[in-house]
Amino acid sequence: MRLSKGNFILVLWRASSLGAALLGAQASAAQKVFNVADFGAVTDGTTFCTRAIQKAVDAAGTAGGGIVEFPSGSFLSGPLELHSGVTLQLDAGATLLGSRDLNDYYSPSANDGKPKPVFHHLIHGEGLHDVTIRGPGTIDGNGDAFPDPHEQIKRPHNINFERCENVLVENVRLRAAGSWMQDYKLCTNVVIRGISVFNHVTHNNDGLDVDSCQNVAITDCRIDSDDDGICLKSTTSVACRHVRISDCTSSSHCNALKLGTESGGGFVDIVFSNCTVFSPTNSTAINGNQRGEAGIALEIVDGGTLENVSVSDVKIRGVLVPIFLRLGDRGRPYGRGQRPAVGTFRNVTLKNITAENCSPLGCAIAGLPGHPIENVSLENISLGFEGGGHLLEFEHKVFQPRNKSNGVAGNDDPTNTKRRITERPEAYPDCRMFGVLPAYGFYCRHVKGLRFENVSLRTSTADARHALMFDDAEAVSISGLDMEGSPESASLLRLVQTRGASIGGIAIRSSADLLLQLEGEQTKNIVLDTSGVRGVKRIFATTADVPVDALVHKP
């Protein structure tokens, strides 16, 4: 089943009540003000102020909480350790600058005396409760001082909270981290709202990462990043659960709205709504693609369960691929655990999504043999592509995956309509990983319970590939499909080894030769309703191995 109305309301209720609870809990603790200038911090942006600022933070913590205020000016600092009940307040015109010397940073102590890899952070809090960072000032990590792509673990994050409860980050401007901009791990009751992120100075410049957290509300945020924009991860056995992302804009050279790549604990009860996605216009790509990779990327590749996910009312512009869904088997273990088994991907709704000016690559919904992506609904979807994909070579640099060591899928068909798509179960998931797909709209492989309702697929130039292709599919439903044809096209719909499909409500914009191609000895129980269909010469064709009774045609 898909995300139920009750679950959706529960997520919204948690998000709205969470913000009110945080404000109430921190109002009493934020009465006393500790101005960092009163503790010796200098506003010239060149004097090192770490000790002075930390003294102010420690004083607020000792007092049981309070506001640590940064007045107008620039404050140069190394890492700062927060305390429960403390609010960092950056006034208008205030900027907290991260040190450009990696020697000024330190790593938090190992957990329980056991060594563990840790990142460096400008602002860090662990095991805290009731902590706030708020603007309207700026936190600038000076991340361009850390350009080495092989030293992610040493490059500082601007903000890191781990195992914290009741976290509020609002109205602050975040700039130029040495790695991820902000990382929230194993936290509960987190509100992030009204923030502005610009992160385009070095590698791994994610905009916002939420890892193994529960009860999270992210609203009214503006994210512009080189690497993934708004990204949920699960690098532990704990799932990201009850997370709501709404009314945000995300612009990324990689993936704008993403679940994964790390997915050990999985993602359960996640809602994206009323968001806008577009390619960055004021930056040059470092990690990804200049025009942005995937608008929506839902991935489960390291075990775990992706379940009850809703993505609705999203507008996408100018990325390579608007929608990319992947169940893979990279199998990255976390901690000292064993390699995880293949995860589960089920119960996902994509609704009211529009996209324009997308590349010819095509969208993939790809599981693995014996491990299908299950129960995915696409409702009221309108996607616009450049077209011409039957003329493209995968080897074009735009369409090569980021991690080239994973290999490059070859092109054994110069028209891209019947080329062999390798499984690549252990590869890093990337919307470019399969190359130019045989379908300009959706290529769906190893799926079960896939539903298309009121879906429109357009191309600005002619494209001879299929509009939709299914391979090893079960229980497919198509109700209302408006698609672009081409006089020289292959079949608009292609079903390979498909067990059960109901197809109706077809509209074709321009003339095409063939509507439906059936292939494979397992293909059966296909019902095709072509009432009202115009602009196609032939309704269906079958290969010799398809059972004679596989298709029921209703003219």
Image (tube, helix red, strand yellow):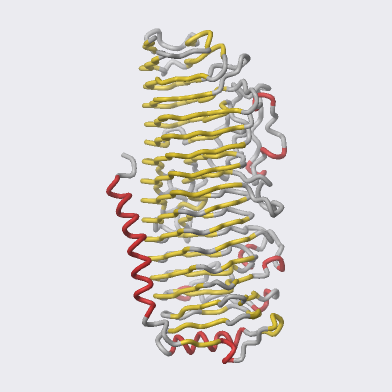
Image position of 32 (left or right of 426):
left
Query: Relative to residue 178, is residue 24 depicted above or below?
Result: below
Query: Relative to residue 75, is residue 379 depicted above or below?
Result: above
Q: Nearer the viewer, residue 475 or 404?
A: 475
Residue beneath the point at 60% across and 51% down = 252
Q: Nearer the viewer, residue 69 or 214?
A: 69
Give the x, y percent position of residue 551: 39, 12
Residue beneath the point at 37% across and 11% down = 554
Image position of 543 (left or right of 502):
right
Give the x, y percent position of residue 19: 38, 66
In what quadrant of the picture does the N terminus appear?
top left
Query: Relative to residue 404, is residue 155 depicted above or below?
Result: below
Q: Nearer the viewer, residue 135 or 490?
A: 135
Give the x, y percent position of residue 119: 57, 68
In what quadrant of the picture does the C terminus appear?
top left
Quarter of the rendering containing residue 312: top left
Total number of numbered discs in the rendering: 0
Quarter of the rendering containing residue 3: top left
Image position of 329 (left or right of 291):
left
Give the x, y percent position of residue 463: 62, 23
The residue furthest front is: 92
The residue furthest left is: 6
Residue beneath the point at 61% across and 14% down = 487
